Image (cartoon, rainbow, N blue to C red):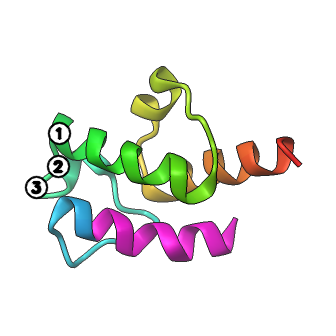
C-alpha cells in the first residue's frame, strides 16, 4: 500500500488544491474538498491504478490512507 499512498497523496493535493495532505488527511476537512473534487479524484484514480471502485465504498472512505488501502486491495485481488 505504501507506494499507492505515496502516489495518492500528491494527487489528492492537486485535486483538492491543498498543499497540506498526508495519509491521515480526512477528505471532508480539506479546504477545497467538494463532491466535484471527489469525482475528479475518482476519474484519475481508476485509470491510474487500473481499478474499478465501488462508488459507495469510495465515498465512504474518510482518509487518504484508507483510500490507498482500498486501491491496494483491489489491485492485489485483480492479479
Residue 72 in the figure: left or right of residue 77? left
Marker disc for residue 36: 1
CA gap, disc 2 and disc 3: 4 Å
Q: Is residue 5 covered in magenta?
A: yes
Badge 2 marks a residue whose secondary structure is loop
Q: Nearer the viewer, residue 24 or 12?
A: 12
CA gap, disc 2 and disc 1: 8 Å
| Numbered-mark total | 3
Q: Is residue 26 covered in magenta?
A: no
Residue drawn at 47 percent across, 52 percent down: 45
Q: Position of residue 32 (x, y in %)?
A: 10, 55
**Crowdedness near tag 3: few (<14), some (14–19) or many (≥20) residues, C-alpha within 10 Å:** some
**Boundaries of the magenta span:** 1-13
Q: Nearer the viewer, residue 74 or 69?
A: 74
**Residue sitting farthest toward the right:** 79
Residue bearing the label numbered 2: 33
Residue 51 in the figure: left or right of residue 63? right
Residue bearing the label numbered 3: 32
Q: Are marks 2 and 3 in contact (CB under 8 Å)?
A: yes
Residue drawn at 44 percent across, 57 percent down: 64
Badge 1 marks a residue whose secondary structure is helix
Residue drawn at 83 percent across, 50 percent down: 76
CA gap, disc 1 and disc 3: 10 Å
- Report the quarter where the N terminus lies: bottom right
**Residue sitting farthest toward the left:** 32
> Can the viewer see residue 22 in this picture?
no
Amino acid at each position: 500500500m505504501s507506494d499507492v499512498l505515496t502516489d495518492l497523496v500528491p494527487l489528492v493535493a492537486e485535486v483538492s488544491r491543498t498543499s497540506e495532505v498526508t495519509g491521515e488527511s480526512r477528505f471532508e476537512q480539506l479546504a477545497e474538498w467538494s463532491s466535484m473534487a471527489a469525482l475528479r479524484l475518482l476519474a484519475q484514480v481508476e485509470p491510474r491504478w487500473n481499478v474499478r471502485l465501488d462508488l459507495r465504498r469510495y465515498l465512504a472512505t474518510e482518509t487518504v490512507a484508507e483510500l490507498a488501502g482500498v486501491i491496494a486491495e483491489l489491485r492485489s485481488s485483480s492479479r
